[in-house]
Amino acid sequence: MSTPFYVSPQQQMADRAEYARKGIARGRSLVVLQYADGIVFVGENPSRALHKFSEIYDRIGFAAAGKYNEYENLRIGGVRYADLRGYTYDRDDVTARGLANVYAQTLGTIFSSVGEKPYEVELVVAEVGETPEQDQIYRLPHDGSIVDEHGAVAVGGNAEQISSYLDQRHRDGMTLAEALKLAVQSLSRDTNGSEREIPAERLEVAVLDRTRPQKRKFKRISGRQLSRLLEADGATTASEAEADANAEAEAEASGDNE
Amino acid sequence: MEANTRSTGRLPAAFLTPGSASFMDFLSDHQPELLPGNKKLPPVQGAIEAPHGTTIVAVTFPGGVVLAGDRRATMGNVIAQRDIEKVFPADEYSAVGIAGTAGLAVEMVKLFQLELEHFEKVEGAQLSLEGKANRLSTMIRSNLGMAMQGLAVVPLFAGYDVDREKGRIFSYDVTGGRSEEQGYAATGSGSIFARGAMKKLFREDLSEAEATTLVVQALYDAADDDSATGGPDVARRIYPIVTVITEDGFRRLSENESSEIARSILERRLEQPDGPRAALL
């Protein structure tokens, strides 16, 4: 019988972290930004069906970078957690903080238990409030820590570079079109500093819109509405495009209920 | 293992197990005691006295369906509540109206709404209208034990079928038996009278406005002959709840709209108390 090599706990954790980080870095980055009327999720995603962003509850949205099967499991777990909580207590008692906590515990336990392979995922849980000050954005790295974020946050492969780009340019009270443009700019910058074009069809965009009359604030933006928002130039036309988009959103509100 | 996962605060394994998109299936695996059908009743003599909801009616028209209900809940010979709401949106394209034991029915609707929303969130797509009707059927069946003790819930389900592009109505019996109704349907204690009224007034080519008037007429006739059904209460400003589902989704008529319909009917009935007359031949 061969004796296993001794690996120090520090080394073991460092290896696991390295493993998870590499897995996450293989995925495309995504960004979550606050804007005047809510929170917008933007990412590059060639698939129309396998979403990176989704609705968890009335005011809570979910974004994930990394391995699809792992974050999909966590997403469904989150939906079950939120629905069960809302059913046992009340819809108002489901909060992003509670959900982020559960995710952190789950990721943390999996990360530190030797028997399990660490999850190669990084999550964002966001809740839109009545006012921009009440918005909450939590970033959850693979190891179970929670980071309370404000303004703009990026996760995935190129996250650090994108974050610093966003931090310099993001400001409070941006319109949806402005925030969307900034997000796309930040995503189109490659690691070597060069820029590439991301066509609208490859973008996945969703918003948590606090002005939506329905109790469920999550909505996907795609097709014509998305291209119109992307084409809107500067601040003056941005508000027009948004008014346009709102009118369209109302017309579509019933039809587009994903 | 179970105790262990709980103590760390991580999501229990049941939450992360891939599988059913049904919230009810999840509950029955994870916390079956929360399912309303699983509550055991102690043996009781005779029927249990609890508030009962009464009449629900539905009518289809080209382009959609109207679902409406009166506002009365009774407990024996007592009016338990004058302004109860018995018609609820189930999701964007469907609604459910309930007759029977009010407490259980409201719980059932809450779970049904959640079931549809849960599926939508997990799968990223809506259930078909048939699928929704079948889920409701399962829920009624799980209540059979209670129904045997007099606590029955008999809903009426109406929705807009986005695939077939028309409004459809499904009625149920206490065992969960489901049948699709053509044109119009009613459930609850006043349903016999309401159905009679609708039979004489229904036409294939009703407009939305006519359909909403028709259901209020039917509820008026039900209240006229059934003591457990409440008519429009002008003094307290309590009017029937009328909802319309079309391709634009679910819409509940505002109090102003339904009061206008109810008042115009009341005015006509002052001259003709039995309502509009159908042709003899």
Image (cartoon, rainbow, N blue to C red):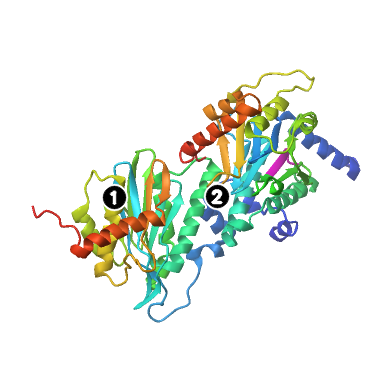
Left or right of B175: which side holds A230?
Answer: right
Q: Amino acid at mark 1?
A: Ala
| Separation (CA) of disc 2 from disc 1 | 28 Å
To which chain does the residue with label 2 belong?
A
Element type at marker 1? helix
Tell me: residue B148, above or below residue A213: below
Residue shown at 54% from the left, 58% from the top: B28
Taking depth in this image into account, of A219 and B25 the one nearest to the observer is A219
Q: Position of residue A169 (x, y in %)?
A: 76, 30
Residue shown at 60% from the left, 42% from the top: A209
To which chain does the residue with label 1 belong?
B
Residue shown at 33% from the left, 68% from the top: B230
Q: Amino acid at mark 2?
A: Lys
Taking depth in this image into account, of A173 and B190 the one nearest to the observer is A173
Q: Residue A88's quadrant in the figure?
A: bottom right
Q: Which label sits on residue A215?
A: 2
Tell me: residue A155, above or below residue B179: above
Within the magenta stretch, is there residue A119? Answer: yes
Q: Which label sits on residue A235?
A: none
What residue span does the magenta drawing correspond to?
A: A118-125
Taking depth in this image into account, of A18 and B58 the one nearest to the observer is B58
Main secondary structure of the magenta stretch = strand
Q: Position of residue A126 (x, y in %)?
A: 68, 44
Q: Residue A39's quadrant in the figure?
A: top right
Q: Residue furthest left?
A: B281
Q: Which residue is mark 1?
A: B211
